[in-house]
Structures are given as structure tokens and as C-alpha cells.
Amino acid sequence: MKISEILKKETPSLSFEVFPPKTDSSFDSVRHATEEISALRPAFMSVTYGAGGGTSRYTLEIAKNIKERFGVPTLAHLTCVSSTRETVRAKIVELRGAGIENIMALRGDLTPELDGSDRSTWHYRHAVDLIREIRDIDDGFCIGGACYPEVHPESRSQAEDIRFLKEKVDAGCSFLTTQMVFDNNLLYNFLYKCREAGITVPVVPGIMPITNGTQVERAIKLSGSFMPQRFKAIVDRFGSDPAAMKQAGIAYATDQIIDLYANGITNVHVYSMNKPDVAAQIMRNLSSIIGEKEC
Ligand code: FAD
């Protein structure tokens, strides 16, 4: 099922993100974790492409397994900046062959090595180039794009960032997923600016439940996200107590999700980080809001 169709539903729903194994030897444990999350029957699941140290090889395998064994619609991430045209085109054909209907089209992060290389030799400079490539090969995919309520770190301004975001949507994105946010007000402000710029596709907020003290630093480094004082106080108070931090982090994320639903957002994407217990607890916390059959 296409994510654009799922996002038309007006009842609150959740989707979860998982990442592929970092090494061949961890394949079985990652697959098992993703299966446990799939069994919760989220509206859809996304599988990252090499992000978080995972290998890109297994994205398709994990996405296919979730879809075939659990009937949960999947969104396979695909990055392009460090790839040749042949590799990317082959991946797109492979995804179609595996019955995957949804692709999250991303540029990928610039490693220091890439950043210093000759850009004139790159086939894909931005995600928009990948979106056009996918559309060129197979117009049947539902394509998603990434967006940044707190501005992408390479952008000179939010206005410029949103202008390029509009270009991605015009090239064929049917929905957008945000970088993680810990302050919903930043998200509401961003949504307003997107609508003002003529971006009318659904924007799915990304929420990351922080469940241990060390995750905080990593999350901020990766995303550059702003940590509200209320959240900092939680980390200061409970960061060194794993059980307490987990409970407080899940409660904070749940609170953010409830606020988003209350303000008219229907689907929230949870960066569940291959943690079935965290995904399950969030679903339990929202059971009467999202209903039992489908989250
Ligand atoms: P782009 O849309 O290309 O934007 C990158 C920068 O270029 C921005 O500053 C933008 O304003 C600017 N820009 C865009 N178009 C143009 C243009 N035409 N001309 C000039 N400037 C332009 N990384 C992974 O490796 N694997 C993943 O699975 C993954 N999943 C992600 C999922 C989400 C929801 C998000 C938010 C990020 C994810 N990332 C992933 C990280 C992502 O790859 C990085 O944030 C990357 O730096 C930017 O990717 P993008 O697709 O947003 O790039």
C-alpha cells in the first residue's frame, strides 16, 4: 500500500523506523527486533539505508520481510550522493521487483572525504536528482522526502531550505518526514512556513524517544535538534538511572505525540531504533487514542 493513501486517513496513527544490521553477524537479531515491531501493526514502517552505521545491503531484505510476513506497508530509504547512476538505477529496479511501493529519497550525508571531492563528477548532488531518477524509471512509486524544521545544517537560511524543499515536492514527493524534534512549537512554525510556501503534501513529524543518557548527545550531534529546558531537566535528573530515564523518555515522547494529534496531525513517525519494548510501550500509552486494531 502506498504511504500517500495511508496518510489520507483521519484517525491518529503511528509509524516506526528501523535500521538494517551493522554487520552480517547481527542480521538475525536485527531482523527479530524488526519483526517484533511489525507485530505491533503500525500504519507503516521505514527502513533506513546505511544510516546509523547500518549497511545499505540489507535495507531491501528487512523491508521485504516486514511486508511479506506481517503485511505492514514498508518505506525503503535510498541515498544517492555517493552512488553511481548504475547502482541507483539497479536499486530502484530491485525495489520494484521486491514489491516495495514506497521510497524515501535522500541525498545522504556528506562524509569529509566526499565533501572535499570534485562535485562536478557527482551524478546526484541533491535528493531532488534522485526523485527525478525514480520518476524517470518508474512513475508508480510513492516517494517521500526529508525535511528539517530546524533547518538543514548546510542551508544558509530557512527560506532557502524551504525553497529547495518545494522543488523536491514539485519533482514528485508525495509526503515529507521531519528530522526529529523535541519541541513541537518549532514544528508548528515550520508547518506554517511550508504551507505559506505552497507545500501542501502531508508532513509527518519525526519523534525520537530518548531512553538513555548517552543517546542524548548522539541524537543532538546527528540532528542538531534543540533540546527544550523541560527535556534537559529530565536528562539531568534521570540520565544516570537507566530504568528511570527510559520511563521518562518514553513519557516525554508520548506527551509530544498526544500534543501533535490534539493539534490535528494524524500520523507520527517514531524513530524507534530497533527497540520493540520502546515501540510497544508507546503504543500502550496511546492505546485508546489510536485504537487497538491499527496504530
Ligand atoms: P537534500 O534535500 O539534497 O538537501 C541537502 C541540502 O542541500 C539542504 O541544505 C538543502 O537545502 C540543499 N539543497 C537541496 N536541493 C538543492 C538544490 N537543488 N540546489 C542547492 N541546494 C539544495 N541518511 C542516510 O544515510 N540514510 C537514511 O536512511 C536516512 N534517512 C533519513 C530520514 C529522514 C526523515 C531524515 C530527516 C534524514 C535522513 N537521513 C538519512 C539523513 C540525510 O541523508 C541527511 O540529512 C542529508 O544531509 C540530507 O539529505 P536530504 O535528502 O535532505 O538532502
Image (cartoon, rainbow, N blue to C red):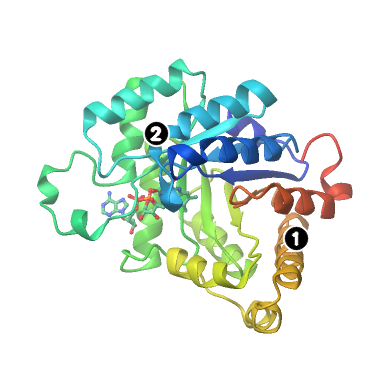
What residue sits 75% from the left and 38% below the top?
40
Q: Residue 122 in the image: state x and y as whole percent.
A: 17, 43
- Residue type for callout 2: Arg
Residue with the mark numbered 1: 254
Crowdedness near tag 1: few (<14), some (14–19) or many (≥20) residues, C-alpha within 10 Å: many
Q: Residue 11 in the image: state x and y as whole percent.
A: 78, 41
Image quadrant occupied by the C terminus: top right
Give left or right: position of 287 versus 14. right
Give left or right: position of 258 versus 101. right
Which one is in front, 175 or 197? 175
The image quadrant of residue 237 is bottom right
- Total marks in image: 2
Residue with the mark numbered 2: 57
What residue sits 25% from the left and 43% below the top?
82
Which one is in front, 218 or 263? 218
Q: Identify the residue at the far front of this view.
A: 25
Q: Mark 2 or mark 1, which is nearer the start of the sequence?
A: 2
What residue sits 13% from the left and 54% below the top?
117
